[in-house]
Image: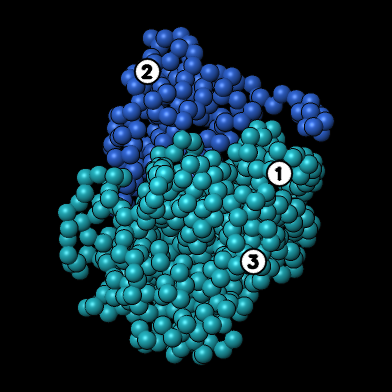
Amino acid sequence: MHKILLKIFRTGNLTEPLPVPAPPLEKPCSLARGSLSIRHVDAGSCNACELELHALNQSIYSPETLGIRFVASPRHADALLVTGPVTLAMKEALKATAGATPNPRAIIAMGDCAINGGVFRGSYAVAGGVAEVIAVDGQIPGCPPAPGQILAFLERLALPEPHP
Amino acid sequence: MNPTEYGPGPEPCFTPGSPTKFVVPCSRVTPDSSADYLSGVNRVLNRGGRLVSLWGSWADERAPVLFSAFSDAEGLLLFRLGISALERTFPSIAFLFPLANRLERAVRDLYGWDPEGLPDPRPWLDHGLWTRPPMVPPGVSPAERPVREDSFSEDYRFVRVEGEGVHEIPVGPVHAGIIEPGHFRFQVVGEKVLRMEERFGFTHKGVRSLFRNRPLGEAISLAGRISGDSTVAYQTAFSDAVESATGSVPPLRARWIRSILLERERIANHLGDLGALGNDAGFGFGQIQFGRLKEEFLRTNQQMFGHRYLMDAVIPGGVFRDLGPGEITVLRKECSRVKEGVLELKTIYDEHGGLQDRFSGTGWLDPMLAGRWGLGGVVGRASGQMYDLRHTHPVPPYDKVRVPVSISRRGDVAARVQVRFQEIRHSLSFLDSVLESMPDGSFFNPLEESFSGSEGIGWVEGWRGEVLCWVRLGTGLTVLDAHCHDPSWILWPALEQTIPGNLVADFPLINKSFNLSYSGHDL
């Protein structure tokens, strides 16, 4: 036990300063007031976006200090964070998850695949982006986007003041 | 081994003059008939060989071909069976190698060829969303069928357990966490799992069709995105395949840098897994501490190779960029820092009673089964199997700087944790020696372009297990067809065998200790 305590004591606070929030959204989405519950849906990604979400969900970035947290059910979520080019087999599952998310909600496409299909565009097995299946409110580009970028975007979405 | 014993038509896989020193030895067998194929495969089994992969190819006007790859002490053995365009069937080898079951079902789904003698009629990658097998070339017209509207509620016939108090828990494809999509069907009594069955194909992206007629530059980028956590392994295997097909030789320094990237990928993923395993056992401290070490590692990757997960750092002919002497010093310092950090955390993990209680005995994979199925990777090694390509078929620099095989015979989650700890330690020592003895020279050799099209194969020990890439190139360095095989194909069935007898609540922990790829499997 003392080794654990000592390690915690020596490690100290890992959380880095907050990133500069991303530029305001094109289409304002005034659903959050200082907190944001996110449900992640993998619609067929290569799992690099998931690695970055795991990296984000750590004390270095500490999204919870901004009121941003990942929840287990779409019923608890303000926003869906969708990764992957949306495979045909995940199309219905994605729609059902979106349908189970209470309004008002935001749909965010994370990563190049979710935005336009990325390297998988043109395949018989993918829809080619989230927007082909459900209306998208925001995009986080990158292959995969770095945790800092994701955090900057989510912080903008969770900002306490209402958008103009 | 004398390849003639396996059947007619034995020949080396690679064209003369190819960089045999840099790739695992491979011989090719071309059986004349189904009977020849079956007796050849039977001999592989009798000699203790194991199944590596099985795939179809029907990319151009050439006759369709079924490939199956096996390995034995000598290296790879590639069977190439022509498929009759009229009958479109091939003999199933699942009665010899049970792991061929899903691979053959996938071939049936993609090409419409029927595996003769396979007792399992269920689809695998096919979710009823295609009107015709998608990999059949245009012009050939197999029977069309209507498309289903609802893929995930399709009535896939899971094996059911019946009896008093038995009930079923369906999980997925959308899981309650940040994970890839897949479906698990549990048959349980109370908290105890009697049976677990997997249903995949949700992340099927049609990668095989995307490889067709792709310029090499785009194809290598695609190969690096088949399973994001193994991008270096895929791109190295793919580059090896391209190099052996063109008879090009990458410079020695490039091989050295590739091994550095491979080991960095292994360490980063193992660090992440160790943290997540602690977290799944209720020890959040582990997640934070290992996460911090991993993040440091990823940031160094970004700084030196321009990508946190090292995507597109390996290219056919060499690597994307060289390492300067200053960077080598930084990397070596980082190695010793991480080594210290991991050692400290290992002591804490080892001494933590609650953690070891969750790990010990949980998710026991029988070493007998692992041996019978020839399981490699972290999972196979944690059940006593001595399979590690870095050790058994070393290519430079693994032939100079040896990596010991990390083994445990316990077969439980604790064993998989221990194997990961050992592998991090060995990889860090390896990195230190390799960084110290980097050969001079260039980091990239342009590929030989004056060839008229041929095939090549690459086989690399990734962090999860063996990644195999097969490539057929046409003129002008166009990829005509390519297949990439993820170790998850072989290891997912082992997870099914591991779950019965465990508690439902232990499944996330066991699944994490395997940490298999859905995307690499579904392709």
Q: Position of residue B307 (x, y in %)?
A: 57, 44
Chain of the residue under the numbered disc 1 shown in the image: B
**Toward the viewer: A23 or B137?**
B137
Q: Mark 3 points at which residue?
A: B385
In the depicted structure, whether residue B175 falls above or below residue A126: above
**Toward the viewer: B6 or A115?**
B6
Q: Position of residue A122 (x, y in %)?
A: 31, 50
Is B481 left, or right, of B394 in this rendering? left
Q: Quadrant of residue B387?
A: bottom right
Chain of the residue under the numbered disc 2 shown in the image: A
Q: Where is residue A73 in the image (x, y as percent from the top left)?
A: 42, 29
- Distance (Cα) linking label 3 and label 2: 54 Å
Q: Callout 2: helix, strand or loop?
A: loop
Question: Which residue does the image show at 46% across and 30% down from the upper left?
Answer: A72
Image quadrant holding the C terminus of chain B, namely: bottom left
**Chain that appears blue:** A
Chain of the residue under the numbered disc 3 shown in the image: B
In the depicted structure, whether residue B410 falls above or below residue B63: above
Q: Mark 2 points at which residue?
A: A29
Question: Which residue does the image show at 82% across and 30% down from the upper left?
Answer: A2
Both on one chain, marks 1 and 2?
Answer: no
Question: Which residue does the image show at 37% across and 56% down from the upper left?
Answer: B159
Q: Quadrant of residue A76?
A: top left
